Amino acid sequence: MTRTRVCVIGCGFGGLEAVRALARDEAIDITLIDRTNHHLFQPLLYQVATAGLSAPAISAPIRHILRQQVASGRLTVLQAEVMAIDAPGRAVVLDDGERLPYDQLIVAAGATHSYFGHDDWAEHARGLKTLADAFDLRARVIGAFERAERCADPVERAAWMNFVVVGAGPTGVEMAGTLSEIAQKTLSREFRRIDSTQARVVLIEGSEHVLGSFVPALRQRAREQLQRLHVDVRTGAQVTGIDATGVHYSTRENGEARAHHLPSRTVVWAAGVAGSPLGRSLADSAGATLDRAGRVIVQPDLSLAGHPEITVIGDLASAKSHNPGHGRGEPSVVPGVSPAAKQMGRLAAANLLRRLKGEPTRNFRYIDYGNLATIGRRAAVVDLAVPVFGALRFSGFFAWVFWLFAHIYFLIGFRNRLVVLIDWAWAYFTFERHARVVAVPMAADAAPASPVGPDEARPA
Amino acid sequence: MTRTRVCVIGCGFGGLEAVRALARDEAIDITLIDRTNHHLFQPLLYQVATAGLSAPAISAPIRHILRQQVASGRLTVLQAEVMAIDAPGRAVVLDDGERLPYDQLIVAAGATHSYFGHDDWAEHARGLKTLADAFDLRARVIGAFERAERCADPVERAAWMNFVVVGAGPTGVEMAGTLSEIAQKTLSREFRRIDSTQARVVLIEGSEHVLGSFVPALRQRAREQLQRLHVDVRTGAQVTGIDATGVHYSTRENGEARAHHLPSRTVVWAAGVAGSPLGRSLADSAGATLDRAGRVIVQPDLSLAGHPEITVIGDLASAKSHNPGHGRGEPSVVPGVSPAAKQMGRLAAANLLRRLKGEPTRNFRYIDYGNLATIGRRAAVVDLAVPVFGALRFSGFFAWVFWLFAHIYFLIGFRNRLVVLIDWAWAYFTFERHARVVAVPMAADAAPASPVGPDEARPA
């Protein structure tokens, strides 16, 4: 029997689902390639960055998750970086030059940060996509308070105690709320020269709204909950520059542009997202069309136009949901969230098997179960799509409990669920963040290149 | 009231005990300086390196452990690197140039690796002293199996699957036993191109004995238990070189020297220990005498000759125990173990307070409760000094259980004890090592500079 060689790039939510579904078929020989050795539960990555959870609590070795599939002889796992996709030659090119031939390809390479063309902002404003990002942010946040404690100059000290989060989507809101909790509760009374509760957490957002993907009532709840947590929320603020001294941004007041400078040594980037560079490789070698964010525009069945053997799923795909009921005939844009990636992974596997049998493929229908975001201790917003009943929306303590159990439920592995539950119960009652441990202190380049002045607003 | 300014350098076992004891006295104003933000339970560091425990399970933020002492106004904690000690000026010089004046100084800066003058070995053979070391080793070990899986050349593949541990003291024995368990159990059936149980773990030791600090019967038990765990034990082997191709060593057979080369891409250094570089600073500025390992030779009361205001404790101190009964009048050398460091910390604090009151100081008496070492799953050796009864020695499963609970008992914090107990129970029944997660893959320099030949023995 000749087995069909399927290559899957990326073991996020989409790639993992696809591999699990395909490995049930003994006619398929899968090679899964990932840059790291672990599947990461990204929705809780901000907890690693803010020292609430250890890295192994939210990640699991790919080989371990898929050990049965490997043992069955249907799956090979390779830790490697894919440098290019050679669509005409039907091969994937790895970092060491190895060419992996495929009959069918599923690209689930995910997304990366976008600094909107300002790549020089990256070194001053770390994003949050990988465990390495989370460790770096943890080192910067904890290091900032340590530097402030050692700092004799009040202006410089203030800059170390200002934390800026750019982007008020779910990640930005979670980060801002948790940073404020750390300053107000976890670290209070642990320093002697500084008062950690005087730290300032500023959340900057270009649009007028916090959590813009939610309905207006919940956006307002989120803003109120953030303010109760002492987060300084500044919407309608366009970032114009990020450097060693802090964040430059502009606002419009009475039609007039005003320039602001917010001195800060710790800036978190939670704003822009762009498709993986493999999107560009697909454009070059398979003629794929990319959207403005560098994501690959896919056919209704998630395959590539002209290349039915290539399927793109997850955050790298610019997909529309072809849902006869939901969108009233008009296809709706699929959001970059983990349930969408999982659903795409399952459809990609099913369509691949249909294609091999000569059956027609099916179009992607995104089933939206709702939208959750947490803000901090005891605060969250929940917007559920309940069949028949309609929308179920609530916020506050019960929303937080719902968010908590929903995330624990979807965590990989029984052990991880147990550990995270214990960690959270512990943190809830003690305010401790047990993972406040920095192995490699923040890079020296976190220190400013030039002196910092106080916050100032001047006409642009 | 003028308070006595006490500076404590290092928050290991010795420094932490000293601070806790001194902070009970309101006439003392302590400044504790550590390079990292955490106290580390070093005896379990090898578990972090071998992915059995997460970093936060064996470490705790210094500020958190000592939060009551900070809140009482008697303690300032600074995360800083001490560059030098200015003994004539009675000040400690920090990395940013800040000078901290002191009235009394306790130096507990610990030890570092010694490559016996071959500092070029360091990049190929990482030691295990810090969390950064442990993460690096974890990345190398897990990365080696991943590289082997991707490797087409059988000679190179074998080099990735050879693991060499240099030094058969407690750390080397623990590392070798655990690495073998990972290859034999944890990873078996998780790879497709390689068979992880074919990996070779070699333990190289210059002397004729494994665990040379134990009595001969237990040394022999340890060797047998290692061999049962498939560890290749090579005693009487002098390492002559470590480079990108592996380890070069020589043995003597029938009076003739033979040179060997062991191809390996993953070498763990568990052999030499040297005092912190601050020992050199004390020699230069306070006339301290160093022993061959760079440790500071202290007076019987742990102070420095000619500088009663300076006390050196822990692994940096070359101390003798003045124990009238135990050593039959002859002072015995104090080993570099955590109980000794803790006992020194307590005496240093007590002697400091005695000195302030004009009372005579007391000499250090090391109370040796015994010696434990674990070898791997269900294997350990225990040599207890029981008062009146004498020595209690046992090995095997019960020794392992004893070792396990002894280590959990001494772990910092109730939460950490609970977490480690759960982790170990889980690992015991599943063979899983839950922390098999690599955030930052091994450095590119881990790849060899030149091709590797097979293991060969030739006359020197």
Image: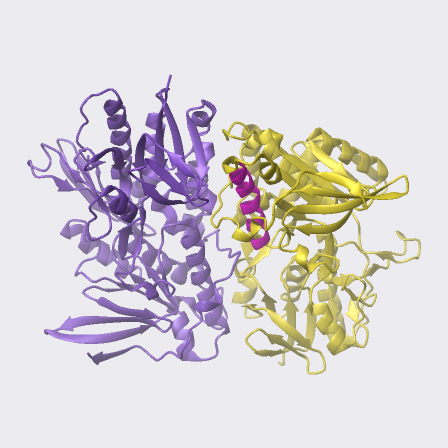
Chain colours: A yellow, B purple
Residue A147 highlighted magenta (yes or no): yes
Please state if B438 lies on the left or on the right of A310 as rendered. Answer: left
Counting from the top left corner in percent of width and height, residue B249 is at 24, 70
Q: Position of residue B287 (x, y in %)?
A: 22, 44
For residue B251, above or below residue A182: below
Q: Main secondary structure of the magenta part?
A: helix
Residue at 71% x, 29% y: name it: A228
Q: Is residue B380 visible?
A: yes
Q: Residue at x 70, y 38 (%)?
A: A455
Query: What is the quadrant of the N terminus of chain A in the image?
Result: bottom right
Residue farthest to the top, as pictured? B1
**Residue range (magenta):** A132-148
Residue B8 shown left or right of residue A310 in the figure: left
Q: Position of residue B382 (x, y in %)?
A: 23, 44
Q: Quadrant of residue A183?
A: top right
As drawn, the residue found furthest toward the front would be B89
Q: How many marks?
A: 0
Residue most extreme to the bottom: A89
